[in-house]
């Protein structure tokens, strides 16, 4: 199959906009909770009704009006994921303006580019450090007026200054935009080159949200549904969820620090979880290490294998046999229920995007009782273009197109996309916009295939396709995902373009290392000591061998090197959405790649 299309379920009124979604929620469920806010010190989360939230949105929007923001102008937000981010987003829309997010980890140079390219007139940032980053480039961003700091009372300042703005002005501004008008400019996180500003419209958010709710209602729209947002709100996936929860009648929570994610999940008790694969890997690895440290390694691994076998059997028409059901019940009582409890105890569904989760983890979590549905999308598609559906999930795929969307596989294997979620173009960049489309289809840059049911399987990134000296085309993602599944491996970058064979650069997960060493009965050691340890080396060798089983001999990793430092957002090797900046890694570690191949020549 070369093309797959899903009929649209909900046609939105073209005269409406994102504000209409909140208005409907307030009219229908105004006295019910829409958001819960973490109070700290173990106190219960504070509930905010839809009516209360709407009133606060209006009050903040008045402050933006008083600050001189006109309809269509841009307002920047630079903050971690927190309640105030979502409040500001809706207030900016209520003022008829355009939200421009900036990652809180952005450098002054990146901030300057976004502020100037998007013509931002007012910036609201989280901390004084963020404010300093903005002010340091003020001379190069002449259109920028004030910079307000959330930690210094920015919200209260806006509310106070806007007290004299009439309600009628906000009501007027809320109705100005239609589905074709600009809602936000989201700058790509920049795995290659300077970030481009994707222009997303009110229609992108409204039509995608309404159709996603209609198709995934049993996940996001059942009574009592709730989700905890911990991904950065500067990322399109988190922004989409912030909108989706409104028509879904879900309750939304925020947590800014993944270091406290598990306690926050346990306290908030989400019914569905939205995340990137790395978080699911971390939860698995953390559970495994705790079991090993407690002397229960064999029980954990048996329970994990049983969960995977049970999940695989669910795909068989005969289903799991009686013996496997009994084993699964025992595994659940001993191990699996504890993992569910770690995720809050109420979560039945999870949606994973941003990278491949891998069949092993997909089956593991389904065996645990958490059905993980993989999806796929980009900034340019307002996050999801497709997702596995509850009534017919296929682990290993990213599902069929969402209602209204369509996929086509080009002659070179590139995935082309159409649908109401596809952006209208790159801000101030007509050349890049023209290059991004062919015959009305958006070029995703990803490689994939469609099965007989129209489900998409992503096989790699077009620009990342490696061609060895022998002419073998290798998509690195398959190998990288499998190697990274090992508890000791944080990141894996497969190399080999124009080389005689495939190699890899690995980094060690320093958070997992102490637990692994303890479980092996080994003393604590530094990263440098661990890299020289024979047992660590042997374990990494097994990870490579296990990954190689998924590919042919010509595609397999023949040599690898372990780097002394991990890739992080702070050191510039990961994007804020935790994707490896491959071009930066290959440039900065070119000597490591050369050493990898020169070792072979020396030994030959």
Image (spheres, rainbow, N blue to C red):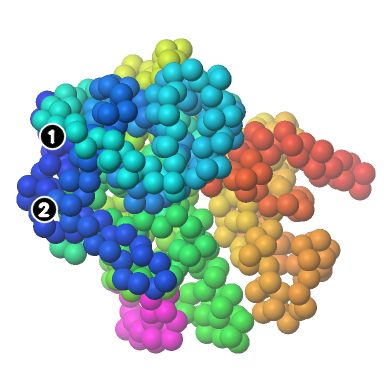
Residue at 21% in and 49% down: 53
Residue at 12% in and 42% down: 23
Residue at 27% in and 41% down: 159
Measured along the vertical axis of the image, is residue 92 above or below residue 335?
above
Quarter assignment of residue 379? top left
Residue at 43% in and 29% down: 146
Kindly tell me whether residue 555 is visible in this rendering. Answer: no
Measured along the vertical axis of the image, is residue 582 above or below residue 74?
below
The label nearer to you, 2 versus 1, is 1
Extreme-top residue of the structure: 431
Mark 1 closeness class: few <14, some 14–19, many ≥20 residues within 10 Å: few
Query: Regarding mark 1 in the picture, which secondary structure is present there?
Result: helix
Residue where numbered disc 2 is placed: 30
Placement of the C terminus among the 4 image quadrants = top right
Image-based side of 515 in relation to 337, left or right: right
Placement of the N terminus among the 4 image quadrants = top left
Mark number displayed over residue 167? 1
> In this picture, which residue range is highlighted in magenta?
319-341
């Amino acid at each position: 199959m070369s093309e797959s299309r899903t009929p649209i379920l909900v046609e939105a009124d073209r005269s409406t906009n994102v504000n209409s979604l909140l208005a409907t929620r307030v009219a229908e469920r105004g006295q019910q909770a829409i958001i819960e806010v973490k109070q700290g010190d173990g106190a219960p989360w504070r509930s905010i009704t839809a009516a209360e939230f709407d009133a606060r949105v209006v009050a903040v929007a008045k402050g933006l009006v008083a600050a001189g923001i006109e309809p269509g102008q841009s307002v920047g937000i630079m903050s971690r994921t927190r309640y105030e981010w979502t409040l500001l987003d809706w207030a900016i829309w209520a003022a008829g303006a355009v939200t421009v997010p900036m990652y809180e980890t952005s450098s002054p140079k990146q901030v300057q580019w976004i502020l100037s390219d998007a013509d931002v007139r007012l910036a609201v940032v989280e901390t004084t450090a963020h404010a300093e980053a903005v002010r340091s480039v003020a001379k190069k961003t002449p259109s920028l007026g004030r910079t307000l700091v959330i930690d210094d009372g920015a919200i209260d300042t806006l509310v106070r200054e806007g007290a004299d703005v009439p309600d009628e002005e906000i009501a007027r501004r809320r109705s100005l935009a239609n589905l074709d008008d600009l809602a936000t400019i989201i700058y790509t996180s920049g795995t290659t080159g300077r970030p481009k500003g994707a222009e997303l419209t009110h229609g992108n958010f409204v039509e995608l949200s309404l159709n996603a709710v209609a198709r995934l209602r049993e996940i996001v729209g059942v009574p009592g549904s709730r989700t905890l947002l911990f991904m950065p709100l500067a990322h399109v996936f988190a922004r989409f969820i912030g909108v989706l929860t409104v028509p879904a009648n879900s309750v939304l929570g925020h947590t800014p620090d993944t270091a406290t994610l598990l306690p926050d999940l346990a306290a908030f008790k989400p019914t569905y979880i939205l995340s990137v694969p790395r978080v699911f890997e971390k939860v698995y690895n953390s559970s495994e290490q705790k079991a090993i440290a407690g002397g229960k390694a064999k029980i954990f691994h048996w329970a994990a294998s049983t969960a995977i076998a049970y999940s695989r059997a669910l795909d068989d028409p005969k289903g799991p046999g009686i013996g496997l059901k009994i084993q699964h019940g025992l595994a659940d009582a001993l191990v699996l229920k504890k993992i569910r409890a770690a995720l809050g105890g109420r979560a039945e569904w999870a949606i994973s995007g941003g990278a491949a989760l891998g069949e092993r983890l997909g089956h593991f979590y389904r065996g645990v009782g958490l059905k993980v549905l993989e999806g796929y999308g980009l900034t340019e598609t307002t996050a999801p273009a497709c997702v596995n559906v509850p009534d017919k999930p296929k682990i290993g795929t990213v599902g069929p197109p969402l209602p209204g969307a369509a996929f086509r596989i080009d002659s070179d294997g590139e995935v082309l996309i159409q649908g109401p979620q596809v952006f209208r173009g790159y801000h101030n960049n007509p050349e890049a916009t023209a290059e991004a489309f062919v015959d009305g289809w958006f070029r995703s840059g990803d490689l994939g295939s469609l099965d007989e049911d129209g489900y998409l399987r992503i096989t790699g990134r077009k620009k990342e396709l490696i061609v060895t000296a022998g002419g073998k085309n290798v998509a690195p993602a398959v190998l990288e995902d499998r190697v990274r599944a090992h508890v000791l491996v944080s990141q894996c970058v497969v190399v080999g373009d124009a080389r005689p064979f495939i190699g890899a650069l690995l980094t060690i997960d320093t958070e997992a290392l102490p637990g692994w060493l303890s479980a092996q009965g080994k003393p604590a050691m530094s990263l440098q000591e661990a890299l020289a340890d024979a047992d660590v080396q042997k374990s990494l060798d097994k990870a490579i061998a296990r990954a190689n089983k998924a590919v042919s001999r010509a595609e397999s990793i023949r040599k690898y090197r372990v780097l002394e430092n991990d890739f992080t957002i702070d050191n510039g090797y990961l994007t804020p959405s935790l994707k490896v900046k491959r071009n930066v890694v290959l440039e900065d570690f070119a000597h490591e790649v050369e050493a990898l191949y020169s070792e072979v020549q020396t030994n030959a």
